[in-house]
Image (cartoon, rainbow, N blue to C red):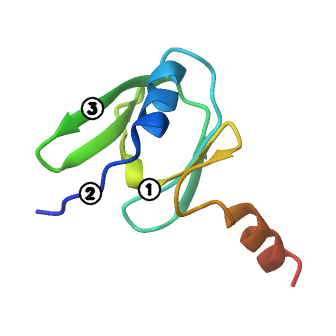
Amino acid sequence: MQTYQTLAPAYVELLTKAVGHKNKLEYFNEYREYKATGAPFKNVVKNETGEFLELATGVEIPLSQIISLNNVFFPGYEDYEEVLGMRCSR
């Protein structure tokens, strides 16, 4: 069973406040593939394996795999936009 790290409370609060609103979310799926969605958020869920963002589509995303929410970059991904720009310019 895989467990996931939790986020600082400020980021969890940011996600919780975004529930029910239109958002731009960037994240990695379980295969480490980049994904982006505008699907509504259903809830932030905590269980025995970690904390997850549940989308209205039923997809659950580990909070540690969220890259950004509405262009606010999450811990560990602060430089992601710059890195992606360098990759695409080659």
> Can you give x and y, in whole percent of width and height, for residue 54 in the image?
36, 32
Q: How many marks?
A: 3
Asked if labels 3 and 1 touch by Cβ distance under 8 angstroms, the answer is: no
Residue 71 occupies which quadrant of the picture?
top right
Residue for badge 2: 4
Disc marking residue 65: 1
Q: Amino acid at mark 3?
A: Val
Work out whether 24 lies above or below 77: above
For residue 25, side relative to residue 71 (left or right):
left
Q: Amino acid at mark 2?
A: Tyr
Q: Residue at x 65, y 36 (%)?
A: 24
Say which element carries label 2. loop
Of all residues, the one furthest to the top in this rendering is 20
- Image quarter where the N terminus lies is bottom left
The answer for how far apart the CA atoms under marks 1 and 2 are is: 9 Å
Disc marking residue 84: none
Disc marking residue 45: 3
Q: Amino acid at mark 1?
A: Gln
Asked if labels 2 and 3 touch by Cβ distance under 8 angstroms, the answer is: no
Q: Residue at x 48, y 38 (%)?
A: 11
Q: Residue at x 51, y 65 (%)?
A: 33
